[in-house]
Amino acid sequence: MRPGVGAIWIALDDTDSPRGGCTTYVLTEVVRTARDLGHDLIGLPRLVRLNPNIPWKTRGNAALAARFGRGTGPRQLVGRLDDRPVWAYAAGRRLAEPDASQLRAAAWAQILTHSRVGEPETDPALVASRRLPAPGLYFRAVRTVVDPAEVEPELVRIGAESRTLGSRRGLVGATAALAWPGRRVTFELIAYRFPERWGTPRRIDPEEIRRVSSRHPELFLCYDRRTRRLLVAPHTACPILYGLRSTDHRAARRAHGELSRTEPWERWLLFVTNQGTGDHLRPGTFSDLGPYESACVVGTLATDPIARRGGHVEFLLTDRLGASRSCLAFEPTKTLPKAAQQLRSGDRVRIWGSCGATETVRLEGLELLQPSPRIRRARPPQCPDCHRQMHSLGRGRGFRCDRCRMRRPPESALPVAPPPSLDRGPVHPTPSARRHLAPRGPEP
């Protein structure tokens, strides 16, 4: 494709703040503006989650991207804006540079208009490019901490135009959204509230959500039966009404059409995402796991698990290179502390989790690979006359009743079942405690 005449990608990040706003909503405004300028959406817009451990993230740490051109070939319905359908085309004709320049300027104007400009940690960024960055940049951004200066050479290489306000941190997310190779994908259909309802309680029927998710098993993270928490709706004053995550975009659209007891939505848009893929997890050893990073490590328990105050469970794990780290299963994950308590020193396990500023690994899942031998212990027998439990006289010396002084030989000891080992198979947190990127697992 000749420079200056191809379809154009628009990516954005860092438009919200801890107090409100929504980057996905800003993208819907960019899509609406592009449509008003006569440009079509080429393919599904992207919702790309990045490193979940970043300390300066706002909420979900997502960046957005969409491709625009003159649509050709088959099209599919992917949204509704201003009471008009939004179509995504399979391919697009080439876009002249004057049109591309106009689109870049209009998109940046929308980003500035709908960002939480002036609030702490809001540093909006736009990246516009006809070419995509190398996929390695996405994997660095989803697994490590990347400085904006590290992505700028790549933007120069592909001839991208960038615009920023503030710290330029948003450049990392916007560039990573373009670099995402999309090898493993899921989908999310997001419905938005009327502006006059923003900040008011959402009206969503949990029972209807449960029924719809049961009819469409492709949907995931809709409702947590263990904690009775509704997972499709945020708990902030942002514009989102609900989001339906699915492994099949058709199931998400069907489920959206079946919801009739929720408050009216003002617009909706379907995204292709990296949610539920586990892309943030890097297989390796503890030496590979730095601050604010995530990993998947195979190792052996160096100690029996220890119950901590608050229902948390901790154990020391040694990897194949001999490095050891403390692993912590937090009580809100529900399933992980219970599973960790059944482990024993010597068990070989696979764990996945992340670190903050310290080296402690916060578990996001675990799997028993090879249990250590469980010792079958014995307990003193019951006195046949007094029916009281006898006491041991020492190794190999048998037992004696304290009341009647009757003695029994060592072989009369009663066997006790060894402590149970964890069932095979991965253990995932309860749905309400899972991260957006966490590998999808069974839901109770």
Image (spheres, rainbow, N blue to C red):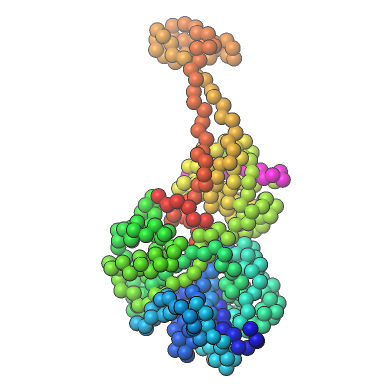
| Residue at image location 58% in from the left, 14% down from the top | 394
Residue 423 within the magenta-colored segment of the rendering: no
Quarter of the image for residue 56 reads bottom right
Residue 237 location, quadrant: bottom left
The total number of labels drawn is: 0
Q: Vertically, is 432 above or below 147?
A: above
Nearer-the-camera pick, 428 or 76: 76
Residue at x 38% of width, y 78% of height:
80
Please state the horizontal and vertical placement of residue 260, each as a whole percent of the image: 28, 68
> Compared with residue 193, is residue 54 higher up or lower down, i.e. above or below?
above
Residue at position x 61%, y 81% from top? 129
Q: Which residues are magenta?
A: 310-322
Where does residue 185 sit, x and y in percent of width and height?
A: 52, 64
Relative to 5, is 429 above or below? above
Residue 311 colored magenta? yes
Q: Residue at 52% x, 56% y: name it.
A: 439
- Furthest residue toward left: 261
Q: Residue 258 or 53: which is nearer the viewer?
A: 258
